[in-house]
Amino acid sequence: MKALIVSDSHSSVKELQQLKEKYEGKVDIMIHCGDSELTSAHEELQGFHVVKGNCDYANFQDEIVTDVDGIRFLVVHGHRHNVKMTLQTLAYHAEEVGAQVACFGHSHVLGAELIEGVLFINPGSILLPRQRVEKTFALLEMDENQMEVRFETLDGQLVEQAVFKRG
């Protein structure tokens, strides 16, 4: 199972267009964790599972729970779960919905962490990163043995990588 995860694009369509052209049809799911600042009808968002961020006014859902190849994803922006301070509230919610992967944004800080069997992924921001200069998105690849998260720039540079054992 492969997933493309982006967040916090803040009205920029060029980056979304590049990612869509490169990954659409090559991943099983494309996720946008909010703060797109675009309308839900915007062409660059078509094909993405998009949630509403604190800077969005469009009619997106606050969260999405969806299954892909037997993997349950929880997608939120994170501002309602206080993710800048702790992942605990989001971890409780992920447990409530039975998620194996929780995707979120809001902080613009990339990261991947395994907590109580749930993989938490913040792809950073493809426009306005914090705590580093690279504008990033995440690629998740899962098989029966492991979960690999790659944080990359639009030009394909690997910024950071994390591998976790499954089970």
Image (spheres, rainbow, N blue to C red):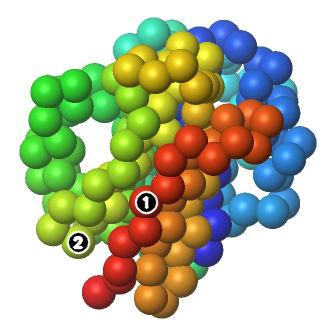
Q: Nearer the viewer, residue 149 or 56?
A: 149
Q: Is residue 13 visible?
A: yes
SS for dot 2 = loop
Q: Residue at x 58, y 68 (%)?
A: 141
Point out residue 95 in the picture as x, y percentages from the top left corner.
18, 62
Q: Is residue 80 visible?
A: no
Point out residue 97 in the picture as x, y percentages from the top left corner.
25, 61
Q: Quadrant for residue 84, please give it.
A: top left
In this rendering, position of residue 60 left or right of residue 28: left
Please give the residue where the numbered disc 2 appears in the rendered image: 117
Q: Quadrant for residue 94, please give it.
A: bottom left
The quadrant of the image that shows the N terminus is bottom right
Q: Nearer the viewer, residue 35 or 51?
A: 35
Kind of residue indicated by mark 2:
Gly
**Mark 2, residues whose alpha carbon is within 10 Å: few (<14), some, or many (≥20)?**
some
> Which mark is nearer the camera, 2 or 1?
1
In this rendering, position of residue 153 left or right of residue 7: right
Q: Residue at x 15, y 68 (%)?
A: 116
Q: Residue at x 33, y 61 (%)?
A: 119
Q: Name the residue at the right extreme.
A: 21
Point out residue 127 in the picture as x, y percentages from the top left corner.
61, 17
Kind of residue indicated by mark 1:
Ala
SS for dot 1 = strand
**Mark 1, residues whose alpha carbon is within 10 Å: few (<14), some, or many (≥20)?**
few
Q: How many marks?
A: 2
Point out residue 148 in the picture as x, y percentages from the top left corner.
50, 67
Q: Residue at x 81, y 63 (%)?
A: 26
Please give the residue where the numbered disc 1 appears in the rendered image: 162
Cβ–Cβ under 8 Å for marks 2 and 1: no
In this rendering, position of residue 154 left or right of residue 30: right
